[in-house]
């Protein structure tokens, strides 16, 4: 009597039919360094050149990420569902690699500790006021100051999204610096690159457009009435509402006198209440700590108002 073979109900369509209606999830298969040593997950390498091999749904683009940030231009997944990428001169430190494909799927992570002597790097990025901008962070400034390390006497290209923006001479102490101006809004991927092709790890910055700094309306707290620009009121306590960048801070000023501080919330909206207003014209402005100033909003506080006809 022949035994009947019944397929397990847990088998996938790949096991039964040699194909699948579902998209194959991308994955990293191996990482090998420049010394041809295989680096296991959570492994350490003393060579910063890393070769990646992986698999994904065929005939699309795949992108290697490091800490969720693109670390290499997208590569093609071939018809057999395989791809490869070479990441040179990976920066010293803890790297968390993954691969993301054009269909929106992302692989599990593969952690590698790169234990190399850094020879080419972007070390820090600053806004004009000195505030640091970390990897993957957001800024509202289109002028950025870069500081980095390279081989003394070499020439370094500062590159953004594949375009060379500046050529820099490396000082005898191995340091270089640059100021980039008029940067566009959007995602910027900066690298430092020597003329021999060696390059640093990328430094990604998201540049956002400045939100308008403004007074949108003024509310009299005693009579709960809106006070238009140029109007008079008997209220001596008013609340100003307006817009600024999320997290932006500064002062409500009357001419040159600081009245009360303001702080915009995560939506870029602020509320500020001013009390004890005297009988006279008041010219309110918003003055941000970073120097931006709004257009004025003028009200006149009076002891009493004549009724309108």
Image (cartoon, helix red, strand yellow):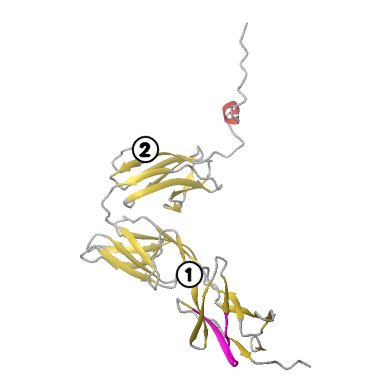
* Residue annotated with mark 2: 40
Mark 1 Cα-neighbour bin, 10 Å: few <14, some 14–19, many ≥20: some
When the figure is inspected, residue 176 is found, relative to residue 230, above or below; the finding is above
Specify whether 93 is left or right of 5.
left
**Disc on the earlier residue, 1 or 2:** 2
Provide residue 59's location: percent of width, then percent of height.
53, 43
**Horizontal side of residue 206 vs 146, given as left or right:** right
**Frontmost residue, 309 versus 268:** 309
Say which element carries label 2: loop
Where 227 sits versus 44, above or below?
below
Task: Answer yes or no: is residue 134 visible.
Answer: yes
Q: Quadrant of the N terminus?
A: top right
Residue at point 57%, 27% (across, down): 15
Q: Residue at x 69, y 81 (%)?
A: 223
The region drawn magenta spans 274-287
As for residue 283 lying within the magenta part, the answer is: yes
Q: Is residue 193 left or right of residue 4?
A: left
Can residue 88 be spotted in the picture? no
Q: CA distance from mark 1 to mark 2?
A: 40 Å
Element type at mark 1: loop
Give above or below for 182 relative to 46. Answer: below
- Residue furthest toward the top? 1
Question: What residue is pinned by disc 1?
Answer: 140
């Amino acid at each position: 009597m022949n035994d009947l073979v019944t397929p397990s109900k847990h088998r996938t369509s790949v096991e039964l039919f040699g194909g699948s209606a579902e998209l194959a999830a991308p994955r990293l298969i191996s990482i090998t360094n420049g010394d041809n040593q295989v680096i296991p997950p959570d492994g350490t390498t003393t060579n910063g050149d890393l070769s990646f091999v992986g698999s994904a749904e065929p005939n699309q683009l795949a992108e290697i990420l490091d800490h969720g940030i693109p670390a290499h231009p997208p590569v093609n997944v071939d018809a057999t569902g395989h791809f490869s990428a070479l990441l040179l001169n990976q920066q010293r430190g803890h790297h968390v690699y993954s691969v993301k494909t054009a269909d929106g799927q992302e692989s599990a992570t593969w952690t590698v500790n790169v234990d190399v002597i850094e020879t080419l790097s972007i070390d820090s990025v600053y806004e004009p006021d000195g505030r640091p901008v970390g990897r993957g962070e957001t800024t509202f400034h289109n002028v950025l100051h870069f500081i980095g390390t390279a081989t003394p006497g070499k020439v370094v290209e500062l590159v953004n999204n594949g375009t060379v923006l500046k050529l820099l001479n490396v000082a005898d102490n191995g340091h270089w610096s640059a100021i980039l101006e008029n940067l566009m809004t959007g995602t910027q991927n900066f690298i430092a690159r020597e003329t021999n092709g060696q390059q640093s790890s990328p430094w990604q910055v998201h540049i956002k457009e400045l939100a308008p700094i403004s007074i949108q309306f003024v509310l009299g707290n005693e009579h709960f009435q809106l006070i238009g620009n140029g109007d008079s009121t008997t209220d001596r306590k008013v609340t100003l509402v307006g817009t600024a960048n999320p997290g932006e801070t500064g002062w409500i000023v009357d001419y040159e006198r600081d009245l009360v501080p303001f702080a915009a919330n995560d939506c870029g909206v602020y509320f500020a209440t001013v009390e004890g207003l005297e009988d006279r014209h008041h010219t309110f402005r918003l003055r941000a700590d970073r120097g931006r100033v709004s257009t004025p909003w003028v009200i006149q506080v009076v002891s009493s108002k004549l009724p309108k006809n």
